[in-house]
Amino acid sequence: MSDKVLMKGNEAIAEAAIAAGCVYFFGYPITPQTEVAEYMARRLPKVGGLCLQAESEVAAINMLMGASAAGTRAMTSSSSPGISLKSEGISYIAGCDLPCLIVNVQRGGPGLGGIQPSQQDYYQATRGVGHGDLRLIVLAPSSVQEMASLTAEAFDLADTYRMPAMLLADGALGQMMEPVDFSAFPKRDLPPKDWATNGTKGARKKNIVNSLFIEPDKLEQSILTRYERYKKVEAEEVRYEEVMTEDADIVLVAFGITARIAKSAIAEARKAGVKAGLLRPITLWPFPKKRLCELADTAKAFVSVEMSMGQMVDDVRLAVNGKRPVSFFGRTGGMIPSVEEVTAEILNVSASL
Amino acid sequence: MTTRFIFAGSGGQGIQFSGKQMAKTGMHVGLNVTFLPSYGPEMRGGTSNCTVVISDGEIGSPSVSSPDILVAMNLPSFDKFEPKVAPGGILFCDSTLVNKKSERDDIRAVYVPATGLASDNGLTGFANVILLGVILKVTGIFEFKDFEDYLLSNIPASKTALIEKNKAALELGYAYPVE
């Protein structure tokens, strides 16, 4: 496919995953991401893969752990309440150093919440998905094109660093249609999966994939080794986009669908004479804290714009480290902030400087 | 130039189809487009709406609070969205199903009895396509031929009747004498 196709975000994830060589999909339906599984069910068997609707989210994540331990490229997809159910398995996957892709097309919470788009799982994705010292690489697409390109990238990052990656989208990105071009995804050189438990064929020593270390010194050592890799991810894989930050007095920080609204709002604010700019984190972990800290030398204030009660704003504060005021603006529960209200907030903050 | 549409009506009127067709044609002629459907309680019966943005520049927000063009195919949609049309915008209204007129003087309102026209012309179920014809005529956003070609090319060649009806409905709308 070299021409652009008009596609739903959820379908773009599935098509990009297949193009990236994903052969196993394990899932359980939940709005607003069910099209991922539908698309996989239709297409994966035709390319020699397998799409399995598990009996529950818990089953799906453990199937993913098995497929990944066997060295195959595999994924699961769900939406917020489903990710909570999967979180035990995600912790085990992290503890076993297994690469795989977990997609969260977020909806409103807590509890069953609603089915409209939200960004309320930022803490969960970047801090607390499962117990223990662990990180996920978290990628936040902002267009249907990125739903595709970051899916492909997430698989490669996971394999490179031998850790799970999460694509953190939302219901609007999952449901909306935009033109997508599948022709130009860069490929990385990936390390061999010589740790995979895929049969010794009598030719090598057996591999063991395990997250249980009864002796604390051994567990500590396994965590320290893992954190060496995390350090490398933080040094080399931070990604973000900047829009009109060079001369900006007010820098908005927003990811995903909210970043697009912020982009429209900074253009409106500039029409009203306020120099606004945007930093859009593409990786939520690792977070672009160094760049934000640099921007605090020139910008006068930061506003984190989110579809939640304010979660990423904590990371913005940590990055800015008291150099400048950081405030929050958002809607929650499935409401999408309008360009008008974000513009009004920029003007408010500007007036208060 | 950016044009923001909201298509709204009842489930089954082809609201999502209309929006998708507008977006697909935009992509086809090389513009940036977004299509955002409603997927909430609406799609489980009741009202249905979708938002389409077509632009020659980068599209920021795919969600729209005040559309440049509103297509209202039932009364609840008229009541909900008519006050939100941007000043200078255009309201297209299926006047067979909406027995109300806009009282605003800062927008243009185009009333077309699309559902009535459809049933009078053996085109029941194609009121949405009639309205698409009217929109093309009034806004000039796309060449009629581009839109028609793309609309028809999406229908399998085996479905001759469907091709004919879409064609007839689009032409009927395009030729409709708008005040």
Image (cartoon, coloured by chain):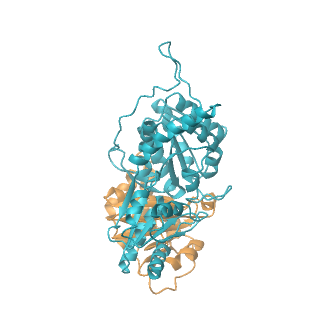
Chain colours: A cyan, B orange
**Residue at x-position 61% and y-position 63%:** A333
**Could you say where residue B34 lies in the image, as x and y percent from the top left?**
42, 60
Q: Is residue B123 visible?
A: no
Q: Residue furthest top?
A: A202
Taking depth in this image into account, of A8 and A122 the one nearest to the observer is: A122
Whether A152 is drawn above or below A332: the answer is above
**Could you say where residue A173 lies in the image, as x and y percent from the top left?**
49, 56
Whether B171 is drawn above or below A300: the answer is above
**Residue at x-position 35% and y-position 38%:** A188
Q: Residue furthest right?
A: A111
Q: Residue furthest front?
A: A217
Horizontal side of A349 relative to B146 (left or right) equals right
Q: Quadrant of residue A91?
A: top right
Taking depth in this image into account, of A135 and B79 the one nearest to the observer is: A135
**Could you say where residue B22 lies in the image, as x and y percent from the top left?**
41, 61
- The quadrant of the image that shows the C terminus of chain A is bottom left
Taking depth in this image into account, of A336 and B12 the one nearest to the observer is: A336
**Could you say where residue A36 lies in the image, as x and y percent from the top left?**
52, 45
